[in-house]
Structure formats: C-alpha cells, structure tokens
Image: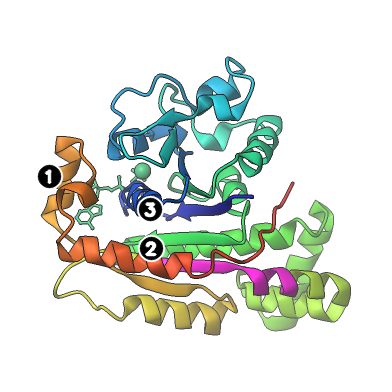
Amino acid sequence: MAHLWPIGGGKGGSGKSFLTSSLGRLSAELGKKTLVIDLDLGSANLHTLVGVPYPQKGLSDYIRKKIQRLEDAVVETPQSNLFLISGAHDNFDIANLPYEQKIKTLRAITKLKYERILLDLGAGTSFNTLDFFLISQNGIFITTPEPTSVENVYRLIRAIYFRRIRYCFTATQFKALEKETDREFGNGAMNKPIYMMKMIAKTDSEKYRQLQDEFGAYRFKLVINQVRKHDNTSLGLQMSRMMERHLGLHVEFAGNVSYDDHVHDAICQQVCFLERYPYTKTAGDLREVGRQVAQDAGKQLIFHYV
Ligand SMILES: Nc1ncnc2c1ncn2[C@@H]1O[C@H](COP(=O)(O)OP(=O)(O)OP(=O)(O)O)[C@@H](O)[C@H]1O
Ligand SMILES: [Mg+2]
C-alpha cells in the first residue's frame, strides 16, 4: 500500500505545488515509484512543475467517466519513477466535487500501486479539501512567513481536526457539543479543539479514546517556505509549540525552505528546480524536508471513508 502525503496550505501561492513536485522528484530519485496527483482542479498547474506541459489525460477524465480506472489517468514525467495524475482539462473547483465522486476518487487513490503518493491540494478549507487531507495519517502543511499565510494555515489545520471530530457525531449531536463546550469553558471555546476534546472526554469516553488514538497517530508536518534572510527562522518551531499549547494539536516542524529567485526562473523555463539548480540553499532545504518527511514513512495508514 502506498504512503500518502496530502500537501495543503490555507493560502494560494504558498508553494504547495512547488513542494509537491520537489518532494515527488526527490522520492523518485531515491528509486521509489512515486505518483503526484493534482487535486487543485480549478487552477491545476502541477503538470508544468513536473515537466509535462500538455498532459493528454487527467483526473477530470476519471471524474467525468471518460476513463474507468484511475490508474489509466496516470501519465509519465521526464523523471524516471515519477508519475502524474494531472488536474488540468477542467475548471470546476474541487469544492464542487459531488459526494459520490469524492468517495470514489478517495478510494481509488488508496488502491493505486505506488510506493509513495503526494497530493497537491488547492488552497482553502472546503470540506472536500479537508476530506482529501484526511485520507492519510501523514500530511504536510505549508505556509510562507507572512502573517496572512500563517493565519490561513492555522485555520486549515484547525478545520482538519474539527472535520475529523465532526465525523464521530450526527449534525445535531455536534451542534449540542459545540454549545456544551462554550457553556463549560466560556464563549468561543468551541473554536478550540482542545476544549472540544475536553468536553468529549467528559461526555463520551469511548469516542474520546478513539479520537485520541487517531490524533496520536497523525504525523502531520509543517514547512515554512519562501523564507528570506531577515525572516524569523524559528517561526515553524514557534507555530508548532503554539498549536500544541493552545489547540492541543501536534504538528511537527519539518524545516524552512529558503526563498530563491531561481524558483521563478525554473518555472518560467518549465524545468524542475531541483534539476536545474541542485546546488542552491533552497535545493538543500528541500532535501532536508524530504528526509524529515520520509522518516515517518514506515507507519501504518488510516483512511476515513466519510
Ligand atoms: N522557495 C521559493 N522561493 C522563491 N519563490 C517561490 C518559492 N516557492 C514558491 N515560489 C513562488 O511562488 C509561486 C507559487 O508557488 P506554487 O504554485 O507552488 O504555490 P501554490 O501554493 O501551489 O499556489 P496555488 O494555491 O495558486 O496553487 C511560484 O510560482 C514561485 O514563483
Ligand atoms: Mg498550486
């Protein structure tokens, strides 16, 4: 079974596609049969970053039933061991993917025969994006050091945990839980998973244990991208600590990736950054992040069929 890494960030332009393509390439270079999937259907451009300017087929052919099996939507890339399912050819947003299609696609992804699968998720916190993130216990969040981007990734992480909690309850039960959490811990407490979990511990120990076990198995990572010289290089560690303390969520800092104008140059030339500029600091940073992320690759996966 493949190891799955969804890659998400609250804000557009933080570097999700750049990181997906880079980690995909690094994994392929290690001899792992690797697939990258572009789930940012509305503004898909992962194909360009992996050197496939005109993908002949893609995910939308599967969703629109022109292709029966998801594996038939895979195209090769110029990099050996690296394959792509493109999100191009369509302009509907993943947020609008109907429920049945989402479940079908989620299941099909988990059955693909690759060693590693990386999912490039679109920006935002639509339910579909959250569900694709929850496909695996692994996951990578990316943000730039800008406060707007940090705020959005923080919101995304919180939304993912809430989405998971939400699955344990009916809509009415969840509403009641929100109200009780606020009543018990003060106004606004329901916006913090740590308080909601405390409330669940009081009212339903079975569900609490189940959620605790699952959250404990998550291996979520945080990457800070486009870090410039004068930026605070400790931001990732600080964010990680803050999430633990204030939200009760464990997201491990996996490293900074330096800002480099060559990233822009490589994209304009439609070549992979790591291939063209392998000796830059940014390339070294990406390799370090790749190592950090792969460290947990041996762990078991959890899937959420919603
Ligand atoms: N480390 C970096 N150094 C310099 N520029 C970068 C770096 N990472 C990303 N960029 C720039 O940011 C742009 C956006 O990156 P990317 O397309 O990967 O973001 P994204 O999060 O996938 O955006 P979207 O949400 O629009 O899909 C790139 O075109 C590139 O120019
Ligand atoms: Mg993108």
Task: From the image, tell me which residue sits under label 2.
Answer: 290
The amino acid type, in three-letter code, at marker 3 is: Lys
Whichever of callouts 2 and 3 sits on the residue coming sooner in the sequence is 3
The amino acid type, in three-letter code, at marker 2 is: Gly
Q: Position of residue 201 (x, y in %)?
A: 80, 79
Whichever of callouts 2 and 1 sits on the residue coming sooner in the sequence is 1
Q: In the drawing, what numbered circle is on residue 127?
A: none
* Badge 1: residue crowd in 10 Å (few <14, some 14–19, many ≥20): some
| Cα–Cα gap, marks 2 and 1 | 22 Å
| Cα–Cα gap, marks 1 and 3 | 22 Å
Ligand 2 located in image quadrant:
top left
Would residue 298 be visible to someone looking at this image? Answer: yes
Task: From the image, tell me which residue sits under label 1.
Answer: 265
Q: What residue is shown at x 15% (from left), y 53% (from top)?
A: 277
Residue nearest the viewer, comparing 23 with 213: 23
SS at mark 1 in the image = helix
Segment colored magenta: 212-223
Whether the residue under disc 3 has CB within 8 Å of ligand 1: yes
Q: Position of residue 33 (x, y in %)?
A: 47, 45
Task: From the image, tell me which residue sits under label 3.
Answer: 11
How many numbered circles does the render carry?
3
Q: What residue is shown at x 54% (from left), y 81% (from top)?
A: 244
